[in-house]
Amino acid sequence: MHCLGSTVRTALLLGAAVGLAFPQSAPPGIPIDDQLTIRKCGGCHQRDSKGMMRRLSYMRTSPEVWEQAIKRMIRLNGLAITPDETRAVLRYLSSNNGLAPEEMKPGFWEVEHRTIGYQDDYTPSPVLQKTCNACHNIGRVLAQRRTRDDYEKLVSMHIGLFPGSANTFRPQPAKPGSAVTAPATPRATPVAGIAMEYPRVPAAPASNKYPVDLALDYLAKHQPLITPEWTAWRAAMRPAKLAGTWLLSGYQPGLGKLYGTVTVAPGAGEDQFVTTTAFTYVDSGKSVKSTGKGIVYTGYNWRGRVGSSTAPVITSTVVPTEWREAMMLSRDGNTMEGRWFWSGFGELGIDVKLTRAGSEPLVTGTDINAIKAGAKATVKLYGANFPATLKPADIDMGRGVTVTKVSAVTPALVTVEIEAAANSPVGLRDVAIGRSTAPESYAVYDKVAYIEVSPEANVSRLGGVKYPKEYAQFEAIAWAAGLDGKMQTEDDVYLGAVPARWGMEEFVSTPDDDDTKYVGSLDDKGFFTPSVEGMNPKRKKQENNQPFNNFGDVWITAFYKTPEGAELKARSYLVVTIPNYTLYDQPEVTQ
Ligand code: HEC
Ligand code: HEC
C-alpha cells in the first residue's frame, strides 16, 4: 500500500501522533474511566492522573469513525482485541466521546449511505472542499469534534500513512530557476482505487497559509471539542426505552410508498434490541416480514440489521430480504427517522419514519400521491387505533377536500371516499384524525406542468465478477406549477412518481463509442443494471483496436403521457464507472 517499512512507520506515528507532542498546558479534555478501554488502549494512549488519555480524550465522533479508527489500530498498530471487546469499547466511546444529535445530523447522510448529490452540497466551507473532500466523503469530517492540537495530529496521521496527502495539504511552490512547475506526472495515491490528480502548483494564497492551515482554522473554530450541544446532550442522554410497537411509513424510490409496523423488544443488553418488521408496498401489494436487531449509541443513534445472509437477486420488482438500518431517535423518544439500505453500496433503500404507537388514534399517511382539483377518489389512510365509529367529520383531509364517506375501518386502515373541490388551492395536504396529523400526505393539483427524472445525475458501477454492481434507480417525478403558474420555481408542487416509458440515449462525449450498447440495461421501472467489470473483448478502442471495458456515460430518458394527453419528457445524466475498490463502510457497528 505504501513504502514505509513497518518498524519505521510505527515509530514515526507513535512519535508524531500519540506520544511526543503532548502539549505543555493540556487543553480541556474528556476523562476516560472505562476499565476495558483503559486496558485495551492505555498501553499506547497513556492516561494521566486526571483520566485524560492521549488522543482519545481530545476527540469526539460517530460510532462509524470510532470503528474505523479501532480497525486501523488492529491493522497497523498491532492492537489485540476480540469482537466482543471491540463492541464494548465502541459503545463506551460513542457515549462518552460521541456527538450530540445536532452535531450528528449534518453528516448523517453518510451513515445512511446516501451518496447522490450529498458530496458537494454538504461541504460547509470551500476550505474543506479542496483539502478534506479530495479523497473521501466529507461526512466523516463533519462528524469530528476535536481540539486544534488533535486535528493537527489527524493531519500528521494522513501524511504519515498516505504521503500523497502532503501535496494536497501543503503544495510546494517550484524552486526559483527550476524548470519543473508542477509534479511531473500525476501519481496515484497509495489508496487503491482512488486515482487523484494533484493540482498544479497554485500561487501562494493571499493569507500565506497552506490549504491545510485554512482547513485546520475552520475545523478548530466550527467543530471544537467542547460545544454547548455536547454539554447539554451529555446531561440529557439516557438509555433508550424503545420496547413496543412502532408504526412504519416509508418510501422506496422505484417501489413507492409502504406502511407497516416494527415491534421492538429488549435484546442482549442495555441499548440492544430485537425487532420484527412487517410492511406492505401500497402500489404492488407485496409484503415483507422479517426479524432483526438493533443497537442505540449515544442515546439516539439507532443502527440495525435485518434478515438472512443470502444475497438476493436485485431487480426493480424484487422486495428486499435483508438490509441495514441507520436512524436517529427524536429527543422525546417517540419517533425515529432515517434510512434502511442494501446492495453492495447501500445505494438501494427506503426512507423511513417510525412513530411509537400509543393508545390514541394515529395516522401515518395515505396511499395516493396526488388528486386533481375537481376529482373524486377512494383513499386509504394508514395508522393505528382507528375507532370503528369513525365518521367523515372525524377526518380532516385538508383545505378544499371533503370526505364524503367512510367505507371501511379496521384499527390500522381506514378507506374513505374524497372529493376535491374544483377551486381547491394547489399544494400539499396534511391528513388529521383526532390529535394525530400526517404532514404532507398528498397533493391537490390543477395540472401536471412537467416531469423531472430523479436523481438528476447518478452514478452506477460495473461489477458482478469480483466486485458488487452498483445499481441505479430512476424515477419520473411530476410537478405542478404552483400559484405563480411558472415552471421550475420555488413554489412548484411535488406530485410524486408517475409511470414512464424509459430509454437510454447516447451522451456525446467520445464520438461513436456506443455507450448505450455496453454500459448496461434499463428496465421499464427506471432501474438500471450495469454490465460486468473488466475488459470486454467485443468492445474495441478506435485508435488502437484494443479491447476496453464497459464504462461510459448516457442520458436516461423518461416519457410520460399526462391525463390531458400531453407527452412530457425529461432526462438524467448517468455515469457508469469502474468498481469501487475501497469502501468506507463499518457494517460491524450494527452488531
Ligand atoms: C499498539 C499501540 C496502540 C494501541 C494499543 C492503540 N492505539 Fe490508537 N493509536 C496508536 C498510534 C500509533 C496512533 C497514531 C497513528 C494513527 O492515527 O493511526 C493512534 C491513534 C489513534 C486514534 C486517532 C486517529 C485519528 O482519527 O486521528 C484513535 C481514535 C485511536 N488511536 C483509538 C484507539 C483505541 C480506541 C484503542 C483501543 C481500543 C487504541 N487506539 C489502541 C497506537 C495504538
Ligand atoms: C490523500 C487522501 C486524503 C486526504 C486529502 C484526506 N484524507 Fe482523511 N483519510 C484518508 C484515508 C485513506 C482514510 C482512512 C484511514 C484508514 O484506513 O483507517 C482517512 C481517514 C480519515 C478520518 C477517519 C479517522 C480515522 O481514525 O480513521 C478522518 C476523520 C479524516 N480522514 C479526516 C480528514 C480531514 C479533516 C482531511 C482534511 C484536512 C482529510 N481527511 C484529508 C485519506 C485522505
Image: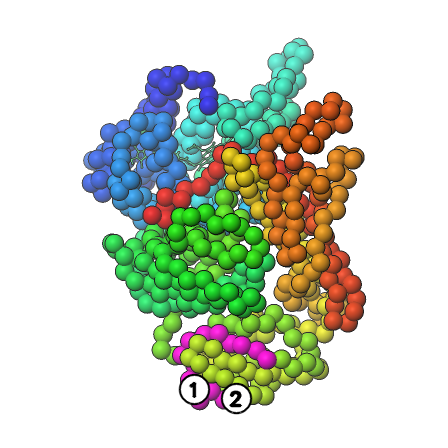
Most extreme residue toward the top is 177
Residue denoted by label 2:
393
User: How many labels sit on residues?
Assistant: 2
Q: Is residue 49 left or right of residue 418?
A: left
Which x, y percent locates residue 55?
33, 34
The residue sitting at 51% across, 76% down in the picture is: 381
Residue type for callout 1:
Ala
Q: Which residue is mark 1?
A: 388
In reply to whether residue 386 is colored magenta, the answer given is yes
Expressed as whole percent of the image width and height from the top left, the position of residue 17 reads 37, 27
Residue 131, by quadrant, is top right
Above or below for 441 versus 303: below
Residue 140 placed where, x, y %?
46, 42
Secondary structure state at the residue bearing disc 2: helix
Q: Nearer the viewer, mark 1 or mark 2?
A: 1
Query: Magenta stretch?
Result: 378-393
* In the rendered image, the vertical position of residue 377 relative to residue 174, given as above or below: below
- Is 149 or 317 nearer to us in this picture? 317
Decide: is 450 above or below 358: above
Residue 454 as seen in the image, left or right of residue 4: right
Disc 1 to disc 2: CB gap under 8 Å: no
- Residue 11 numbered tag: none
Quick one: 62 or 380, which is closer to the camera?
380
**Number of residues whose C-alpha sits closer than 10 Å to that of mark 1, classed few (under 14), some (14–19) or many (20 or more):** few
Q: Quadrant of residue 30?
A: top left
Residue 166 in view: no
Residue at position x 29%, y 44% from top?
87
Q: How far apart are labels 1 and 2 at the CA level?
A: 14 Å
Name the foreground residue: 216 vs 359: 359
Cβ at disc 1 under 8 Å from ligand 2: no
At 51% from the left and 72% from the top, the residue drawn is 365
Which amino acid type corresponds to the residue marked 2 in the rendered image? Ala
